[in-house]
Image (tube, coloured by chain):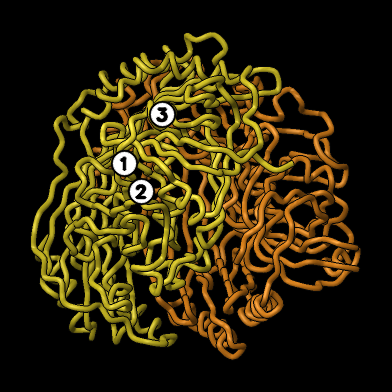
Amino acid sequence: MTMTQTDLTARLLAMSKADQTEVVIAERDRALTRFANSEIHQNVSERDTEVRVRVVVDNRVGVASTNDLSDQALAQVLERAHLLARHAAPDEAFPGLPGPQPQPRVDYAYAAETAATSPEARAAVAEVMCRMATEAGLKAFGAYETSSGCLTIANSRGLYATQLATKADVNLVVMGDDSSGYASFTGVDASGMDPEALGRTAIEKALLSRHPVELEPGAYTVLLEEDAVADLLEYVANAGFNGKDYNDGISFLSGHLGEQLVGENVTLYDDPLDPDMLPLGFDGEGTPKSRLTLIERGIARAVTHNAYTAKEAGTVSTGHAQPAPSTACLPTHLRMEGGTETKAELLKGIERGILVTRFHYTNLAEPLTATITGMTRDGTFWVEHGEIVRPLKNMRFTSSALEALRMVRGLSRETKLVPGYYGATRAPAMVVDGFRFSGVTRF
Amino acid sequence: MQELAHHALNRAQVLGANYADIRFVRRHFETITVRDGHLDGLSIDESAGFGVRVLYDGSWGFASSATISRDEIERVTELAVAIAKASRTVQRAPVRLGAPITTRGRYRTPVAEDPFEVSLEDKIALLMAAEAELRSVKGIRSAEASFGCQKEEKTFASTEGAYIEQELIETGCGIAATAVGDHDVQRRSYPNSFGRHQATRGFELVREVDLVGNARRIAEEAVALLSAPACPTTVTTVVLDPTQLALQVHESIGHAIELDRVFGMEASFAGTSFLDPSMLDGFRYGSELVNVVADATAPGGLGTFGFDDEGIPAQASPIIERGVFKGFLSSRETATQIGRESNGTMRADGWQRMPIIRMTNVNLLPGEHSFERLIGEVDDGIYMHTNKSWSIDDKRLNFQFGCEIAWEIKGGKLGRMLKNPTYTGLTPEFWANCDAIGDQSLWQIWGTPNCGKGQPGQTAHVGHGAAPARFRNVRVGILP
């Protein structure tokens, strides 16, 4: 796989007549088995290789891509990028492509057995979870995805970076007539996934959440499980910690780096090389990645930059570029430090409150306060004296995630890797006081 | 292409498939973005490949590849059958597709001015002019203008004898300005938020939209919002502009009527629906004024095409008539389960995805009110414009929307500008409180080019016809 990509990048760089040229090759093999009502209803596979070329001519930039690897198509993709560059106005702020840099080795981002997962193996995992749900008088819904890929970036200044990666991802919802429960797994290696354990977790929640009752909206102490915490963290990081918005003065963090942003028990990293994440050694323009402390004991420490926003800010890239033409520079490997208690101990410490399994369809209502709205789903429970006493109908929350992070009373020792919109976040469970629910449902 | 298609279909049959189809798709996409005085993004992307879908003993298998060759088609077809056999090991009831579909035909989006024929210089100059106009307004911190056009060539063939060729063309554009004040950031977009308005039309759309002519007004509104009072928290009458109403239709009607969601096929990801087949022809979805049709034939709609990805001809089918629920969006498989025929809404996001039920143009039909009358009949209310945020639960009942801008309505007239407006409600209650809809002159199909659904994720381009409409007793703002 890698040899082919090395050849391809060398050929394209040799063919280009531009001042600077960057080639990004993304090869992916992906398969997903999906089940609903305890049977497989969709089962798919795809194989694709995208070649993306960015050329720079007199500070004019053009980008083109193709997935046709024929000689003719590769020549055309270069021609198209040149054509676009010729039509672009010079951008004096363009920092140029990065030069060669030592790249971190992330061999642990790839598991050969996961890459070779067969349709039969995926079906067997689905079968276990569907059978367990059926035996419990419930129905299973979910998906099991395995993927492998190779990403290579090379440019005419001599930069070369390449990486293999795999991912296994299971999400499982088990439903009864008026209840549901959830479990999931995300990781580099499918061998770390236990379908029976996932089935037990989702079934237990689905049984516990039968016959839910309504609760008045208002401010409550909540135990947010890891999926819900990861959801909030992604919004906080994207709304506040991306260098572009920071430079533009439209982030809640603009001008406030170094200040106490949230509670002292909150520490948040972008940690792309951690083996317990979905490791990635370099960003979309080949800049090596490393751990970046975003929040240290509540103090905002850094924002993410690509080469362009870094030049604007008079600093260096933190390795957060997306492949061109995207100008985004988002944290994609968030990891929040856990606490000292177990999740069970956190629950014991709640006198009266709500346990939230996860959120659904969250959205940023107000970027400056990181106010987020969304619904709870797949297991929402009323807690009294440290015990779950009854299930609740789903509730709408509208709450500032920053405010929530100022009101953290406890964090779990256990953390979980949760896939998100832009990457994956490793989060603990979290007890928050005064979390605001703005509405209830009648189902 | 026909020979390669037949090779795949024959191979699938030899391997025992009861049904197979193949789609070849080539997508060509051009985007231009101008931001803060410079060309921020200029790209041309091409992606081509094919996908083979087979039904083996009542179970689905799908495989795809970017390499279009006889050998690869053979490998992918064999993989699709192997996947279907794996599916069969966890099967409760075999899939039934109903009557065979043997459609043969061609379709091309009619455009007055091919967007790919307009020179790059002209497109860039137009965006630069619009973006400069935005930034010329004092108080604007950041501005952007964008353009995008797409051409998708699709060939569909099935073992039932269907053979269809389509060329779908889309064009879109938009501008946005961000103003920054003391502890406040406000953004205005035109003609729609989140990038651009898009349609199955040519460059004539861009000329009609007149980005440059609207830029100053939009930028001035963004600046004015900084000093505008906040929208109050109350229960009141709300008038929604067509762009916001289009998203309201999308979230609280369009997704709820997808029959795959109703049957739980999206339960683990996007969710289900509060609707079920027993509610057909009886459930009151909204007031007598509410008429909704799913119309894949509507000229210019972003969800307009010739045939869906199962070979069903585009059609207009009733969804809500005089407030009563009448129909779902369906596929061959799901329609058969309720004793109906598919109304042709299966679409795949490119060659590498299996088709799933997607909205076409789910249109709220116009009423009889002029804009003046919509506002004039309100003593006390709020007029909200342009979506800023959205959220709805997994059954499509409990929603909350935020808009970029609002104006209070006092004594039948628009009054002060208000910032950060939001409203919330429950789907059937909200639509039951619709007491006026704007007339045909105010009606337009708005494109939603970012509708997410499915695993692996698929993005669909769908449309929603809407005129401004009025709703009574709406909860506005967030309860303290």
Chain of residue at mark 3: B
Residue assigned mark 3: B41
Q: Secondary structure at mark 3?
A: strand
Q: Secondary structure at mark 2?
A: loop
x and y percent of residue B3 in the render?
Answer: 9, 66
x and y percent of residue B395 in the render?
Answer: 52, 62
Amino acid type at mark 2 = Leu
Looking at the image, is mark 1 or mark 3 nearer the viewer? 1
Have a look at marks 1 and 2 and say if they share a chain.
yes
Have a look at marks 2 and 3 and say if they share a chain.
yes
- Density class for disc 1 (Cα within 10 Å; few <14, some 14-19, many ≥20) is many
The tint chain B carries is: yellow
Mark 1 near mark 2, Cβ–Cβ under 8 Å? yes
x and y percent of residue B195 in the render?
Answer: 42, 34
- Density class for disc 3 (Cα within 10 Å; few <14, some 14-19, many ≥20) is many
Amino acid type at mark 1 = Gly
The tint chain A carries is: orange
Q: Residue at x 33, y 34 (%)?
A: B369
Q: Return the disc, 1 or 3, that comes first in the chain's sequence.
A: 3
Amino acid type at mark 3 = Gly
Q: Residue at x 36, y 57 (%)?
A: A48
Q: Return the disc, 1 or 2, that comes first in the chain's sequence.
A: 2
Q: Secondary structure at mark 1?
A: loop
Residue assigned mark 1: B367
Chain of residue at mark 2: B
Vertical side of B287 occupied by B178: above or below: above
Distance, label 1 to label 2, CA atoms, is 7 Å
| Quadrant for the N terminus of chain B in the image | bottom left
x and y percent of residue B202 in the render?
Answer: 21, 33
